[in-house]
Every structure is written in structure tokens, then in C-alpha cells.
Image: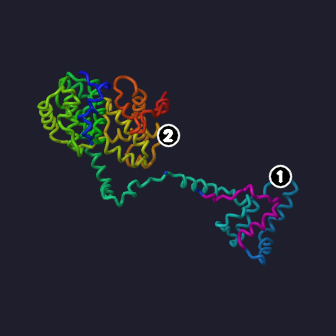
Amino acid sequence: MEISVDNNKPANLQGEKMATRKFGVEISNNRRALGAISQKGGAQIYPCVVNKRTLSQANENNVVNQVHRPITRKFAAQIANKKQSFHEDVSKPKQSTESFKVLEDDEDQPVPMALETTEPQKDHMEVEMEDIFEEPVVDIDISDTKNSLAVVEYVEDLYAHYRKMESYGMVSPNYMLTQQSDVNERMRAILIDWLIEVHHKFDLQPETLFLTVNLIDRFLAKENVVRKKLQLVGLVAMLLACKYEEVSVPVVDDLIFISDKAYSRSEILEMEKLMLNTLEFNMSVPTPYVFLKRYLKAAQSESKLEQMSFFLIELCLVEYEMIKLAPSFLAAVAVYTAQCSLYGFRQWSKTCELHTNYSENQLLECSRMIVGYHQKAATGRLTGVYRKYSTLKFGYAAKCEPAKFIVDETQ
């Protein structure tokens, strides 16, 4: 089986018949500058200390004489050898009077160095700095409190339910070996790559693509399909996904046209019945899309990050080995890898970790795999995703340099 899009015949997808249908993140300086202290000798510093305590001019001399006389006698001995510090002496008057209280809000006056370098103040400084630089967790829903469509009151419950139900939409990672005899992983990759191009040409919603791939894998995991019917499975899966997600749905004749009349109308309708019965009409499954939108909101994303995340996750859709991953995990890895690719360093905020329930260490191994997909996206025959995201519409996301430093860390 060979499925491809003929680049020489743009009329297949953009011809006269199809042209009429469009589906579709200042710390104030509380520390006083020690370099500003230019006084020499102990006696010249104390008036500054007295001024700091806002004593009246009449009582100033009394305080100095009463409190600092012991210090003056000691300085007489210390000046002789000029080798010892007076830090310990200055600290003694603090114990003899309670009227010496520094006004912390007077920031313009320098404080003697001796009053700045006690160990308890260092400990307080360290704790204070830790509190300042501790990363906050952002309330990502606060801006949507007045938006009834955002259902802020229920959004956490909704995503908790998605996390519980996502396993029901997953398939065995070995179904190609146990269920299929005439179809292999390579054929599935060709089909998904082609459907990504069809999805792009029809200008369908992103939800439709993710549901299409989910329907294909769930059907192939239950029903044996011969090689020549694989493309039909893909077309019908997209048709069902459109009926579930889209407002304007492509008609059967459109599917016949894009398949180059490989299948008849009756074959498409028969496969539609078979697929719905095989899947027991269960179309409501959480795909990576619903998690990706939530995680991008947690990452406070902009357009570039969003486009990059979708590019990487669509690369994963083509790869059969990625179906073993839960949709929530795949979405988290895509956002993490996209941040690394755009910013050039590893980044995973506490807000992202809170809403995804995945730590950075949990994401690293899979992220390296995605970087590998990114590196080879423009090579080989399966370049549909790369060409799609190499356009202005998608911000040339595919041309961004891969986060190779993540892979290099293991080498």
C-alpha cells in the first residue's frame, strides 16, 4: 500500500471543486551601603548612632557619656597597637539601655559596620532572601472568572475526570503484532502523515486530528484490516471525527475525491457502520489536545510556544511507539520540550508541575525522544508535519532549532 499526496496535482485538494468548501512572569534594598561609612576612630561614629535613635540635642551628650564611656577607655588601649577591632565593644552598650532602638524605616542614614555584622542578622538575611526568590504558583484561571465558557468553578473537576478516563481511550502498544497481520507500523505512519496533510488542506479544527488518530488506533486494535483497506479506515475515522467536532462537515464525495476514487460511496458508508459498532459508538475520549490546551495555559504560553507544542505533539502522532504514553503525559512532554527548544534552557515551573502532576525528571526521557523526532522531521518520506509547520500560518515552528542540549546531557 502506498499513500501519498501528489505535490504535482494541487487540484486534488485545492481545485475548483474543493475551493468552494472550507471546513472548518523590585526587590528593595533594605541593606545599607557599608561603603558609605567614612568615619575613622570610634568616637566619631557615635553621633551618627545617636541621630539614628532620634534623641533630642539636649540629651544627646548625656546618652553618649553614659553609654559609651566604657568604650572610650578601651579605645585608648586599642589605638596603641592599632590591630584590634572595636566591634565587640560597640555591642556592649546595647545591653545597658533599652532607649537605643534603630528606626528601620530611616534608610538614608548609614549604620556603623559593627552594628551590621552579627550572626543572627546573617541568618535572618538568608531566610529573607529564600522567601523572596521562592517561585510562586500562579492562579491560571483568575482571568477567566467572568467567562462563563471557561467554567472556572468546574474546570479542576473536569480535568480530574479526564485523568481518570484517559486510560479507556488508550490501546495496547503491541496491537500491531497481536491483532494485525497485513498492516505494520510503517503503514500506519504513512497513513497518519497523509491525514495530517488532508486535515490541513480542509482547514479542520485541531481536535478533529487528535480524535481521528485515536479512532484509527482503537479500531485497528480490535479489527483486523487488510492493507488495501487501511486508507479507507483513515478516511472514515476523519469523517466520524468531523461529525463529532466540526460545525461544517466534509461530505462523502469529498472523501472519494481526495482518495483519488480508490473507494466507492457504499464502501465508505459500510466502513462507517463497522467502525462505530466496533467502537461501540464511544467517541467521547480525552485526547492529548484537551490536556495540551490546559498545560499551555499553565505555562502562560504565547503564540510561539503554542505552535511549537502542537508541532512536536503532531510529530508524536505519526510515531507508533508513542501510543503507549498517556495523553496527559504526552501533552506535558510536548509543552516541556517546546519551552526548552524556544528558550534554550530547561524550564518547568511549579505552576506547570502542579497542573500536570508531572515533575521535570519524569519528562526528561521522553523529551529526548521528541527532540530526536524534531531533528529528523525534514528528512525521509514522512515530512507532512514539517512542511505544515514551516509556513507563516504556523509561525515557522518547524524551523526552530531542536533542544539538542537535552540529548547531549546524557552523552
| Residue 344 visible in rendering | yes
| Residue 362 visible in rendering | no
Based on the displayed image, in which of its 4 quarters is residue 224 positioned? top left
- On screen, residue 88 above or below 355: below
Q: How many marks?
A: 2
Main SS, magenta residues: loop
Residue at x-position 18% and y-position 32%? 222
Q: Is residue 118 left or right of residue 310?
A: right
**Which residue is the site of mark 1?**
83
Residue at x-position 45% and y-position 46%? 349
**Which residue is the site of mark 2?**
343
Residue 72 horizontal/vertical position (percent): 83, 65
Residue 278 horizontal/vertical position (percent): 15, 35
Q: Secondary structure at mark 1?
A: loop
- Is residue 30 highlighted in magenta? yes
Residue 129 horizontal/vertical position (percent): 58, 54
Residue at x-position 41% and y-position 26%? 376
- On screen, residue 55 above or below 107: below
Q: Which residues are magenta?
A: 28-54
Q: Residues within 10 Å of mark 2 (few under 14, many from 20)?
A: few
Residue 263 horizontal/vertical position (percent): 16, 27
